[in-house]
Amino acid sequence: MKTEVIAIIGAGKGGTAILETLLKMPSVVTKHVCDVNPSAPGIVLARKHGIQCHTKMTAICQDKEIDLIFEVTGRKEVFAQVLAQKQEHTRVICSEDARIIFHLLDLQQEVSDRLEDDNIMLEQRVLERTQEQEKANLDLEQKIIEYEKLNEKLQQINNEKTKYLMHATHQLKAPFAAIQSYTDLILEGYAGEIPKTTRAIVEKINKRCILLSDSIKDMLELANLKSLVKENIQMSVCPIDSIVSSVVKHLGTLAVAREIKISVPETFNDVSVKCNRNQILILLSNLLENAIYYSPNGSMISIAVKAVPPERVNISVTDHGIGIDEKHLHRIFEEYFRSNKAVAVNERGTGLGLAIAMEIAGIHGTTIKVESTLGKGSVFSFQLKTAQKNKTA
Ligand SMILES: Nc1ncnc2c1ncn2[C@@H]1O[C@H](COP(=O)(O)OP(=O)(O)OP(=O)(O)O)[C@@H](O)[C@H]1O
Ligand SMILES: [Mg+2]
């Protein structure tokens, strides 16, 4: 872009405003400023910027370098004189034309003042918002710390509760075992002959003792599982067939007594799983025990093992028993929940079996799924990670 060389004649208010604007423009050089008054504001400003200053306009009109002259004296005779004396190529803007420029300059000033004000306001607002945000962040951090502390405390209380429950139930175990063995002695005749009615009462005491011992065993089991530290649980590689056959063998007599048949898969294709063997035995036993208890005599239960590629195996227990009401499905894993139908079929239950099973599933990073139709039967299933045999995790 060509540099425009400019001169200003008249250094009053108008000339000064034009000079101020020209000084900000990169492609413009203001070479001369002229005014009859040597201390006019435009002359003072021009001197500061090293611009040639004059009281007469002869030098300006004779300068061949000048492209444009601003004649802003407001005097017609001066304008006529400039027109007469200027170089041929030099253009001239008179006071009349310059008025439009002054107007535009005023507008520009107004707009830039307004922009500056808005900018200041905006900065102020951003500052206020940032401060508000910082305060909110601090409050939030404080709240998080408080909640973490509270959570820690709650966990501590919970651990204490579990410990207390374990101690209390453990203390109950021995006296109940003693009562049971005394009633066994009486029933077996070691305390001599007893009348029929007394025998009936002692038999009831004996039955209740067995029930309570079962409950205590389950409560201890659950409390124990809840207090386990996941990282400390020993996982090993176990062949799935040995787990299934062990559980079936353990509950076989219960099923035989009810003429219930348990079908197991013929082949396990050498599948091994990564688990804590004892815990998975308890989990599967609880599922199979429920299937037996809540099935009619002479019915069929099947255990299925299916690979779920790439590295999981699905183990399911299907029965054709009493089934579960849809409205109870979400409650069956709760501690102590038992449906009325279940109580009617099996009075010897604590309602802890599935809670224990779910706790074990959680420890193994899995869950237990259930599908059931009231009066038709249920399918309980869970998945485990497969593993290569003979490798301890
Ligand atoms: N296979 C099943 N068929 C029908 N209902 C079932 C079955 N398995 C569980 N349920 C329902 O879920 C409830 C909870 O089962 P869970 O095993 O926790 O307790 P329980 O069998 O009643 O007692 P226990 O703690 O002695 O096992 C049962 O009372 C029963 O209502
Ligand atoms: Mg049960």
Image (spheres, grey):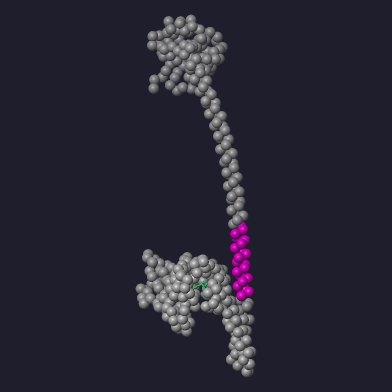
Q: Position of residue 309 (x, y in %)?
A: 37, 65
Residue 75 on image: x %, y %:
50, 7
User: Is-magenta flag for residue 152?
Assistant: yes
Q: Nearer the viewer, residue 383 or 321?
A: 321
Q: Main secondary structure of the magenta part?
A: helix
Percent coordinates x, y for residue 99 in the rendering: 50, 15
Is residue 223 located in the magenta-colored stretch of the structure? no
Residue at 58 percent across and 47 percent down: it is 137
* Residue 29 seen in render: yes
- Outermost residue on the front side: it is 375
* Residue in view at x 60 percent, y 93 percent: 189
- Residue at image position (61%, 71%) is 165
Query: Bounds of the magenta span?
Result: 149-169
Q: Quadrant of residue 212?
A: bottom right
Q: Where's residue 177, x and y in %?
A: 60, 82
Does residue 203 sit above or below 134 in this rendering?
Answer: below
